[in-house]
């Protein structure tokens, strides 16, 4: 008995590499892109553990729950962590980042979430990237919720580690994810004696055994169905056009806000400035009438 999900031909190294190349084009990056075989928490944690350790001074921006998790990982690595927390209904500003550098000039690592799925906010990465670049710090970005809904441009923004997942605005699978890695980030990992090696968390393993080897032999059997789903997802975005996809998300978000406001929703958990609201569907408070009837 045959089944479309079973008895598939093996996923070759060449096809795996071609999917990585398509993801790189989606991000408009010339950095190395590694597709990791797990949900985005895998490269998010692997990137921090690969680049941070004792001697690292990290500015960890908290605009939602994921920033709190990043701080925990950084501390577990032995880094000195400076948390810059802002109310979850706001976004951080480049001026706040600049002030943090002025107060803590030893900062050499900055972690940030681009778009907060839990609050509906978008942080101004392009402006923040300019500040980070001025101070020479490594820039780590969680773009899982933003890719496909708004521009994600690691090279243009000076991002050294940019993690994406396909399961949100891209409309793809959750079982694989990707990270773009700059040469500076690879060098930081290579110099870090605590960077994971021979580990599922190790990005260096992919660098040394996959990229440096010309992407000829995979480290292990890939998640075949998820890789095929990711390939189909990127192909669909390419066919429709990324700009068209992002415009559709923006239109859907605007319609969602308008409908919720018409029902009496209060935007207590989103930015009041339109420029910093996510194009993907936002979060809101309950409509007041419904709230009173229920409670």
Image (cartoon, rainbow, N blue to C red):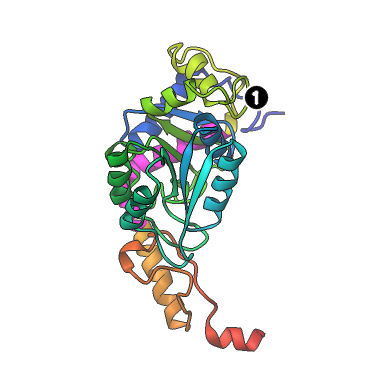
Neighbour class for label 1 at 10 Å: few (<14), some, many (≥20)?
few
The quarter of the picture where residue 183 lies is: top left
Is 36 drawn above or below residue 244 in the view shown? above
Reply yes or no: does residue 198 show up in magenta.
no
State the residue at coordinates (65%, 24%): 7
Instruction: Locate the C terminus by quadrant.
Output: bottom right
Q: Would residue 97 appear left or right of 73 to someone viewing this image?
A: left
Q: Position of residue 122 (x, y in %)?
A: 39, 57
The quarter of the picture where residue 23 lies is: top left
Give the magenta-colored segment's residue range: 226-248
Query: Between residues 275 and 52, which one lies in front from this camera angle?
Result: 52
Task: For residue 245, say whether it is visible.
Answer: no
Query: Between residues 14 and 202, which one lies in front from this camera angle?
Result: 202
Q: Would residue 77 appear left or right of 34 to someone viewing this image?
A: right
Reply yes or no: does residue 234 show up in magenta.
yes
- Helix, strand or loop at label 1? It is loop
Task: For residue 190, say whether it is visible.
Answer: yes
Query: Between residues 192 and 117, which one lies in front from this camera angle?
Result: 192
Is 2 drawn above or below residue 159 in the view shown? above
Q: Position of residue 252 (x, y in %)?
A: 39, 64
Dot 1 corresponds to which residue? 7
State the residue at coordinates (47%, 82%): 263
State the residue at coordinates (59%, 21%): 197
Query: Between residues 218 and 44, which one lies in front from this camera angle?
Result: 44
Q: Would residue 24 appear left or right of 229 to someone viewing this image?
A: left
Q: Position of residue 32 (x, y in %)?
A: 39, 26
State the residue at coordinates (37%, 63%): 277
Q: Main secondary structure of the magenta part?
A: helix
Instruction: Locate the N terminus by quadrant.
Output: top right
Q: Position of residue 284 (x, y in %)?
A: 49, 72
């Amino acid at each position: 008995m045959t089944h479309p999900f079973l008895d598939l031909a093996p996923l070759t190294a060449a096809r795996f590499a071609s999917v990585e190349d398509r993801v790189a084009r989606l991000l408009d990056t010339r950095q190395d892109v590694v597709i990791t075989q797990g949900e985005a928490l895998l490269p998010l944690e692997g990137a921090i553990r690969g680049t941070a350790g004792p001697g690292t001074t990290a500015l960890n921006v908290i605009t939602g729950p994921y920033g709190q998790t990043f701080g925990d990982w950084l501390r577990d690595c032995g880094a000195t962590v400076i948390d810059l927390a802002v109310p979850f209904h706001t976004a951080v500003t480049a001026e706040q980042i600049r002030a943090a550098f002025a107060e803590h000039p030893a900062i050499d690592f900055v972690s940030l979430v681009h778009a907060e799925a839990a609050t509906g906010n978008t942080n101004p990465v392009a402006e923040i990237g300019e500040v980070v670049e001025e101070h020479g710090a490594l820039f780590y970005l969680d773009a899982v919720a933003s890719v496909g809904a708004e521009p994600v441009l690691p090279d243009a923004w000076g991002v050294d580690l940019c993690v994406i997942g396909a399961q949100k605005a891209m409309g793809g699978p959750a079982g694989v994810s990707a990270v773009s890695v700059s040469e500076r980030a690879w060098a930081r990992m290579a110099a870090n004696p605590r960077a994971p090696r021979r580990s599922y968390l190790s990005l260096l393993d992919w660098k040394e055994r996959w990229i440096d080897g010309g992407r000829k032999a995979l480290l292990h059997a890939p998640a075949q169905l998820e890789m095929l789903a990711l390939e189909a997802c990127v192909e669909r975005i390419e066919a429709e056009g990324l700009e068209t996809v992002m415009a559709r998300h923006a239109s859907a978000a605007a319609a969602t806000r308008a409908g919720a406001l018409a029902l009496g929703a209060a935007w207590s958990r989103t930015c009041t400035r339109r420029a910093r609201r996510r194009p993907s569907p936002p979060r809101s408070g309950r409509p007041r009438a419904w709230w009173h009837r229920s409670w």
